[in-house]
Amino acid sequence: MNIAEIQRLLAHRYPFLLVDKVLDYEVGKTLTAVKNITINEPFFQGHFPHYPVMPGVLIMEALAQATGLLGFKTMDQSSQEDSLYLFVGIDNARFKRQVVPGDVLTLEVELIKRKRTIWKFDCKALVDGELAASATIMCAASTKPE
């Protein structure tokens, strides 16, 4: 999936779109995506000016966006239609490695279960095969309010 399809599926835009491309996916099961980390990211101006580190919450957001891509592909919809896909919970978040400019963050998400509108995913963020962060993320599909 290239950036054009990602933007068709997700409502996020710069500077908050945190997925650059999708390497592989299997509808209803898994998705692997990447985020290229560059010094030009706006958050590095303040986090931290003399030691740039990607904020952990943005790593979690990148993973949540990857779950959104898998969710929309599974539902065969996009956020541009009448659907919204909201981050509703996170469990067991762990940070194992700092993510810095020059890193390629690989986002791996696996659908654990889906019950009505609630989706639960096992998520990992890796750099060069090394675990940077992990979490169980829950999202909910809903209809956009009028």
Image (spheres, rainbow, N blue to C red):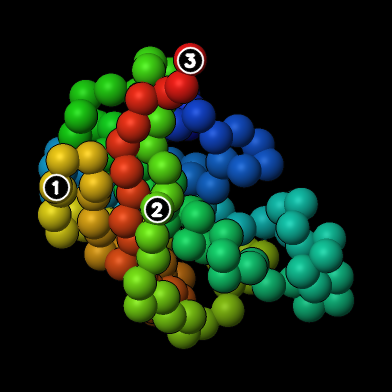
Q: Nearer the viewer, mark 3 or mark 2?
A: 3
Q: Which residue is mark 3?
A: 146
In the picture provided, is 4 more to the left or to the right than 16?
A: left
Q: The disc labelled 1 sits on which kind of residue?
A: Lys
Q: Residue at x 46, y 84 (%)?
A: 96
The N terminus lies in which quarter of the figure?
top left
Q: Nearer the viewer, residue 115 or 97?
A: 115
Q: Residues within 10 Å of mark 3 (few under 14, many from 20)?
A: few
Name the residue at 52% across, 63% down: 59
The local secondary structure at tag 2 comes to strand
- The location of residue 72, given as percent across then percent down, is 29, 32
Q: How far is the residue under mark 1 from the one under mark 3?
A: 25 Å
Label 2: which residue? 88
Which one is closest to the eye, mark 1 or mark 3?
A: 3
Q: Residue furthest front?
A: 146
Query: Image height check: is 32 above or below 2?
Result: below
Name which quarter of the figure residue 75 lies in: top left
On screen, residue 48 above or below 43 = below
Mark closer to the chain start, 1 or 3 = 1
Question: In the displayed structure, would residue 58 be above or below residue 145?
Answer: below
Dot 2 or dot 1: first in sequence order is 2
Q: Which mark is residue 26?
A: none
**Distance from Cα at disc 3 to Cα at disc 2:** 21 Å
The three-letter amino acid code for the residue at tag 3 is Glu
Please tell me which residue is depicted at 18% across the width and 54% down the height of the picture: 111
Say which residue appears at 54% left-offset and 47% top-offset. 18
The percent coordinates of residue 106 (x first, y second) are 41, 60
Q: Quadrant of residue 78?
A: top left
User: Which residue is disc 1 drawn over?
Assistant: 115
Dot 1, how many residues are within 10 Å of its Cα: few (below 14), some (14-19), or many (20+)? few
